[in-house]
Amino acid sequence: MSQLSNCDVALLSRWQILAYALFAYPLAMLALPVYVYLPQFYSEQFGLGLSLIGSILLVSRMLDAFFDTLAGRYIDRYSPQVGFRHFLLLAVPALLTGFHALFHPPAWSGTALLSWLCGSLLLVYAGFSLASIAYQSWGATLSADPAWRTRLTASREFVGLLGVISAALFVQFAPVQHLSWLLLISSVLALSSLLRWTPDRRQTTTPATSAATEAALTLRQLFAGRDFRKLFLVFVLNGIAAAIPATLFLFFVKDKLRLEQSAGLLLLAYFLSAALSMPVWSWLAARIHESRAWALAMLLAISSFAWATLLSAGDLTAFAVICVLSGFALGADLALPPALLAGVIQAAGHHDKYEGSYFGVWNWANKMNLALAAGLVLPALEWSGYTPNTVSGSVQGLSALTIMYAVVPSILKAAALAVLMRAKLEKV
C-alpha cells in the first residue's frame, strides 16, 4: 500500500479520495435511524414514555461519549504500529451486530426490554466510536493543505449525506428494521474499498520516539491550545442547536404540522439540500476561509428556524422551503468543522501524531450534544403537557414543541456564531 508524507495529499487521485469517502456511507446510514427514528420506534411499538426513552438515551450516550476519549488515546498509542485498519476491522462487526439487535428486539417488556435496548445501544455506540475516530483520524493524516483538507472532508461528508438520504428513502418503502441488511451490504463493500485503496500515512518517526511509546495527549494538554478551546466551544453550542431539531423532527412534522405522510420526503429534501451544498461551501471556504463560511451558514440556519416558529398545521410548502434552507446550512456544519479541526491540529504541531486524541474528544462532544438533546428536551416536552400521537394536542404542548424545535436552537446558534466571530480562527 502506498504511503504519503504530510504534504503529499495532492498525489491522491480522485479514485483514492472516493475510496476513502465511501466508508462514510454506512456510518451515516445508521445515524438517521438511531438518532431520529429510535425514539418514535420504541414509543409507538412498545409504548415506552418519552421521559423513559430520553433518560435511557441520555445515560447510554453519556457512557458512550466517555468511551470516545479512551478510544482516541488508544488509537494514538497503537496506530503507528498497527495502522488505522486494525481498529476498523474491530469496530464494524460490533456496530452491525448492535444495530441489528436494536431494531429487532425480542418480544419482551419491562426491565428485560429496557436492558436489551441499553445493551444494543452501547454496542452500536462503541463500534461507531472506534470506527469513526479511526476513520476521521486517518483522513486528517492525509490532508495538510487547507484547500485539500476541505476537499477531503467535503467529499467524505457528501458521501455520508448520500447514506442518510438512502436511509430516509428506504424507510419510506420498508420498515426501519429492514435497514440492517442494507447497512450490512454497504459496510462490507465500503470497508473493502477503504482498506484496499486508501493510502497509509508515512511513518516519520523512529520506533524509539514514535507515538506508540509516548503518552497520548491529556485533556489538559488538548485544551491548553486557545484555538482548540474556541473551536470546541463553537462546535458544542452549534451541535446542541442541530441535535435538538433532529431529535424532534418527526414529532414536529406529525403533531404540529400534521404532515406525517410527507415526513420522509421532507427529510429527503433536507439531506439532499445538504449534499448539494457541499461544493458551494468547499468553494466558499477556499476563498474566504472555513470559519467565515461557517458563520454565513449559521446565519442561514437561524433565519430558517425563525421562520419555522410561524408555521401552523398544513404548511407543507413553507416547511419544505425551510428544510431546503436549513439543509443547505447543514452542509457547512458537516464539512467545515472537521476541516477547521485538522487545521488546529496542524497549527499546534500535532499533525500525524495525536489525531486520535483530538477526534476522540471531538466525537465525545458530538455525542454529548445528542445526549443532552434527547435527555433534556424530551422530558421537558412531556412535563410541559406535550403528548405524542394525539389527535388534537393541547395548545400549551404544541407551543412547547415549537419553542423546543425552533426557538431554542436559534438561540444556541446565535451564541455559537458570537463565539466563532470572536475566536479569529482564520489563521489555522
Image (cartoon, rainbow, N blue to C red):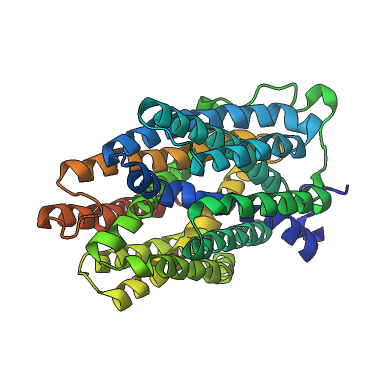
| In this rendering, position of residue 325 left or right of residue 187 | left
Image quarter for residue 20? bottom right
Number of numbered discs overlaid on the protein picture: 0
Question: Which residue: 12% across, 55% down?
Answer: 394
Image quarter for residue 200? top right
x then y, percent, for residue 315:
26, 74
Residue 267 vertical position relative to residue 349 in the rendered view, above or below: below
Question: Which residue: 55% across, 53% down?
Answer: 178
Which residue lies most toward the right here? 1
Which residue lies most toward the front here? 107
| In this rendering, position of residue 383 left or right of residue 48 | left
- The answer, for residue 2, to whether it is visible in the render is yes
Residue 209 vertical position relative to residue 428 in the rendered view, above or below: above
x then y, percent, for residue 336:
53, 57
Instruction: Between residue 322 and residue 5, name the one nearer to us.
Output: 322
- The answer, for residue 359, to whether it is visible in the render is no
Question: Which residue: 25% across, 39% down?
Answer: 379
Instruction: Between residue 149 and residue 350, name the one nearer to us.
Output: 149
x then y, percent, for residue 348:
61, 39
Instruction: Between residue 133 and residue 288, name the one nearer to us.
Output: 133
| In this rendering, position of residue 21 left or right of residue 343 | right
Which residue lies most toward the left here? 395
x then y, percent, for residue 124:
55, 38
